[in-house]
Amino acid sequence: MTPPIETTGPLVLYVDDERPNRVVFEKSFAGKFRIRTACDGAEALAVLASEPVAVLLTDQRMPGMSGDELLRVVKRDHASVVRVVITAYSDIEPILAAINEGLVARYIVKPWNREELEQLLRWAIAAWEFSRDSAALQHRLLETERLATLGSIVGSVVHDLNQPLASMLMNCDRLMYLVQAVPIVRGLMERADLSEKERHHLDDLLTDLPEIVDEFRQSTEHMRGMTVELHEFVRGQRREVENATAPVPVIKHALGVCQDVAVRARGFLRYDGPETLPRVRMSSTELTQVLINLVTNAAQALGDRPGGGGNVVISADPGAEQIRFSISDNGGGIPADVLSKIGTPFFTTKRQGTGLGVAQCQRLVGKAGGSFRIASEIGKGTTVTFTLPTR
């Protein structure tokens, strides 16, 4: 016996250009929710204009107006609607883009599971009902859901990264072993009958190879440390780590990693501080994350200088119980209205940015018991200062 169709309650709008999908959705949920379907973005917008909609579920790939285009219009004109995208798992990049832009709070992977989708619809309707009491409360709820959704995506990506990372670590070990042959090859080169060009080429190889291999090893170990910490974070686990890191090697590694960004901005990077510093109470993986994020941002800011020639300086000032680190650039500076929003999750002024870099730095520094501050002046540059305890 077919259950009666629900005709009251908040409206759920399902948008899909394939009629069989619309029929299946309607038959699956019409007895539990008030459902309307639309075959494209134009029909969906007509429904939204005619009556209040609580939840919008839209396919991502549709002819004419795409799912993302529809979601942007709905976000602008019907902000209280809880938006969900339905897509194939292979569409991971557009999913991330939609989440980062705040277009959706959740996503559904085809083929969807009826019980899971029903649970999601009940959650989405409850979230929409919050908007009638407090738009700010609904906003915080959806922001939290976006972070949780990103966490689930991160978990799958981390799992997929483990295999290539294991191979890279094995190759690092092999390269470190082969580097030990550099003095032998140099001795053979001195006795060999080589042209000047061949000798110069070999000399470059033997000079640069140990440094390149060491940089490769540090970067790979950093990636491995990040994937381990992300995996534990997603699973809700905590691992006791040795939070006593020598800062100078990490600073130099971060400068090496970010060198290419500075070159493209026609700028320079340097460290201005003691060659030895007390160990800080933060893991090397987390300190590397903080420094690479901040130095990359500073190096990119150098591109705002007409004619190039800018510089980024990392300085370190050790005190009795903490070290104060500063990353300063003489780029274009940050306007006050933008500066007040930096560190807010998902806020970014970069076209390809996620808005999570500075927020992550603040979180890691705060977790270690330090402080974090950004100061900037238009036309003069920006300085990020953070402290880390040494004991």
Image (tube, rainbow, N blue to C red):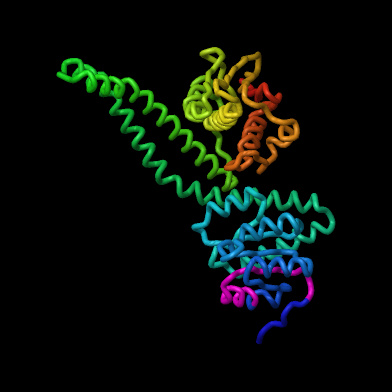
Which residue, as the protein is rendered here, is positioned at the far left?
193
Residue depicted at 72% across the width and 69% down the height = 46
Q: Is residue 380 left or right of residue 211?
A: right
Which residue, as the protein is rendered here, is positioned at the far bottom?
1
Q: Is residue 60 left or right of residue 2?
A: left
Q: Quadrant of residue 360?
A: top right
Q: Is residue 284 magenta?
A: no
Q: Is residue 234 left or right of residue 139?
A: left
Quadrant where the N terminus sits is bottom right
In the foreground, 236 or 292: 292
Residue depicted at 59% across the width and 41% down the height = 353
In the foreground, 44 or 225: 44
Q: Is residue 30 left or right of residue 263?
A: right
Residue depicted at 63% across the width and 48% down the height = 100
Residue 14, horizontal then vertical, whole percent: 66, 69
- Compared with 259, 166 (above or below) is below
Residue 290, horizontal then vertical, whole percent: 58, 30
Q: How many marks?
A: 0
In the foreground, 46 or 83: 46
Quadrant where the C terminus sits is top right
Camera sees residue 246: no
Residue depicted at 22% across the width and 23% down the height = 198
Q: Which residues are magenta?
A: 8-26
Q: Is residue 9 magenta?
A: yes
Residue 142, horizontal then vertical, whole percent: 71, 52
